[in-house]
Amino acid sequence: MQSKPQAKYLKDYSAPSHTVSNFELDVELHPTDTKVTARASYKANNAETVLTLDGVELELESVKVNGQPYSDYVQDQTRLTISNLPEKFTLEIENRISPSTNTSLEGLYLSEGAYCTQCEAEGFRKITYFLDRPDVLTDYLVTITAEKNIPYLLSNGNKVAEGTLPDGRHFAKWQDPHKKPSYLFALVAGDFDVQKDTFTTKNGREVSLEIFVDKGNLNKTPHAMASLKNAMKWDETRFNLEYDLDIYMIVAVDFFNMGAMENKGLNVFNSACVLANQQTATDRDYHTIESIVGHEYFHNWTGNRVTCRDWFQLSLKEGLTVFRDQEFSSDLGSRALNRIDAVMAMRTHQFAEDAGPMAHPIRPEKVIEMNNFYTVTVYNKGAEVIRMMHTLLGEANFQKGMKLYFERHDGQAVTCDDFVAAMSDASGKCLEQFKRWYSQYGTPTIKVLTNYNVEDETFTISLEQVHAACDPILQPLHIPFAIELLDENGCTLPLILDGKQVQSVLELKEFKSEFTFENIKSQPTPVLLENFSAPCIVEYDYQMDELIHILKHASSDFTRWEVAQRAFTKEIKQAVLSLTNTGSVNLSEHLIAALKSILNEVETDKALISELIRLPNFDTVSAEFKQIPVAELVEVYKQFEQQIATQLCPELKKAYSESHEMGEISSYAVAARSLKSTALFYLAKVSDDEVSKWLNENSKSENMTLKLAALKAAKSANHTLSEQLINEFDANWRHDPLVMDKWFALQATTDNDEAIQLIKSLYAHPCFDKGNPNRVRALVGQFARSNPAQFHRIDGKGYELLADLLIELNHINPQNASRMVTPFMSWKRYDEQRQALIKAQLQRIAEINNLSDDLFEKVDKALNA
Ligand code: TRP
Ligand code: ZN
């Protein structure tokens, strides 16, 4: 019997026993035998005589107290407990670690020959014994020693010394002038190419900017560098926040569990989130890079200068920083398209999480493995909660709140409550009820009824909040609910309540609210939850002609997208029901006509048109069903896509032909490529000579966005060109695994019974590596997420493939294994047969030896919640 992992609770928080200062860390690098020496002054906070340090997989060499060897300690798997200590003392600990055998990508490990660290959340304890918790802030002096063939030795802060040792090795010493928690520590050592630049802050300080990449990749760094400079500028302009060190470094590594990490002055990035040029990266990749470079940079203030008291407060830094990176992208690019992205992420991933066995509030209360809580809930719903405060307060008051937050808490480790208090105190707005968003999980549903009264010329909207039934202390939330009323010409009507004009954000505070708007001359069409003003589901029985009315007339691009999605969803749901009778289903002529006229709009942003004519994704639509009818949905999508292709062929061709790219990465060119790609996706299903020619041309394009669009279109349509194009891509790009990820992801969507065999055979592809999270996610992650027909095969082979992989990854990289288990979490949403098949796989995983805490927590919840 394995002992069951223990959960930690927010309510059990207690302050650290000791304060740490003058921390000196010496790291002598060696692939299998790195020696770490940690020296620091400790001071008991409440006369404690016992110090318990965290440490995992460390080979302890020696312990010294006040310079003398000390033996009054005990060690277990995760701790070192030292007893009979004075109030103040210095502690020196020596231990050894083996980076080359560390495949967890947490702690100190090797990525393609380069040493690097990942310490968030609790990885520092894999380097040395320490109080590895975010509320222990200390000053770091780090000395790195290595062989001379490793030229760059990097850590946080400023380099204060370097030199050669008598034995021929060299060293570098780094001092960080800012106190920090251990999770922000970083060390990198390797041989790189470096792109250098500078940024002058608003106060005239010059900051060196350095991006370190694998040799030969300097032609792929300009976009990340430009993004960094834009981010630095933007944070000064919008938030009045200036960078606080003389140097800012970014290192790109190939083996990385997430997107990037905000270590003070030394960000470590997944190379996929840095490297880009037109030949290798799509426009979407460019956008992702900009937002992640921004995100990590913005953490310097929201995360590093003010950090989290404990890990339950993760959303304090992540929700806020996602909000900031979304605003950055919106200010630099299209606000509507960025909002569409953010809302799609919520509906595709967060709603499912919030409705499943891993549901948790944005500030969780119970955690077994912290790595499991870097979730779309903490990040994206967390950002929506910040956005709601922004909506309720307005930009000016919100910025006052930020200012007060930094005045009060710079240099501290604080809680989400501290943040809300600053917002409330600075603005005078009461946020007491609003704080429930931090403790209640589940997506609220808002049921809406309307009534138009001809005699009174009034329009009444009745709203009811409905919350996840399982919460014991369920209370109504404070919800900013934005609305708009359109008249029959599509004009926006003034909102008049009790004779006074009000603004469009209604504040819901009770379970039930009712608003009666006056002076409404004819039946209006309501736009509800405008701009997704709260992370909720709106239940309202729109008629198709109302949706199309809004689609035609709404002035907000976001609203148009929103109703287009609703219209498609409505038709897909109806089609699923009628499929059983007839076998064939049809998109309504009404909607087809609306799509035609959208394609003919000349004034509209082509990127928006591209979004408007796309069906909502599979997961978004699935959320509408109590039990997900997988096979039926797959069939309806197929038929609908084919109908759009056939019936809109001339308009799609025209849109394709009239989308010209001018300037490589101008927003105009990006929009043109987006519309071209969507048009091509449909057109490949018509497949005449002209379309074949276009597919061919684009597949040979020097631009990855267009090239990939052609491949995706051909693959999805099972076009005769498909196999040839796929083989060509493989032959041309085998030397570049990051590019091959796009190819693996494409192969993963293979829509026939060979899919399973194909994926298994690709495990042996020279570019594939189960230890590399990017590869695994591209191939198997994409399969489980985006190939519903094959993943949910009724013979269970899809589920078996995923479970096999998870069992293998459990000992290679538990963090990655745990993220990959997500598609199994919603097993109860499928039919009985599929439920049984998934459950069997979950049980298989539950029974393996040495199941990691990461997988245990999720599998246990899935099976027993
Ligand atoms: N804090 C990082 C961010 O949001 C993400 C992060 C958390 C991370 N844990 C990690 C990155 C583990 C890599 C590995 O920017
Ligand atoms: Zn972050």
Image: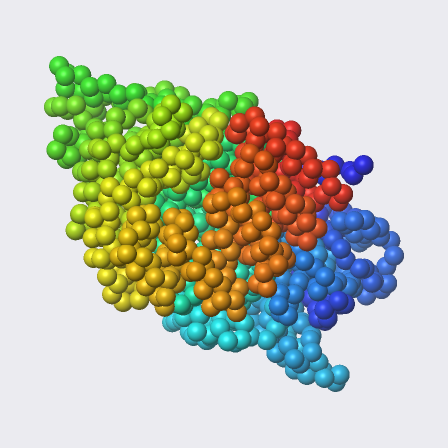
The percent position of residue 101, horizontal first and vertical second, equals: 72, 61
Outermost residue toward the right? 71
User: Residue at the spot x=87%, y=53% of the render?
Assistant: 72
**Which residue is nearer to you in this view: 468 or 411?**
468
User: Residue at the spot x=67%, y=71% of the render?
Assistant: 143
Task: Say how many tags the image has.
Answer: 0
User: Residue at the spot x=48%, y=48% of the render?
Assistant: 750
**Which residue is nearer to you in this view: 626 or 99?**
626
Q: Is residue 173 above or below residue 764?
A: below
**Which residue is nearer to you in this view: 51 or 473?**
473
In this image, 307 relative to 542: left or right? right
Snapshot colouring:
rainbow
Q: For the N terminus, which image quadrant?
A: top right
User: Residue at the spot x=50%, y=61% of the render?
Assistant: 740
The percent position of residue 188, horizontal first and vertical second, equals: 61, 68
Residue 171 appears in the picture as rendered: yes
Q: Is residue 68 above or below residue 484?
A: below
Determine the image quadrant of residue 328: bottom left
The percent position of residue 229, horizontal first and vertical second, equals: 39, 66
Residue 179 appears in the picture as rendered: no
The percent position of residue 151, horizontal first and vertical second, equals: 61, 78
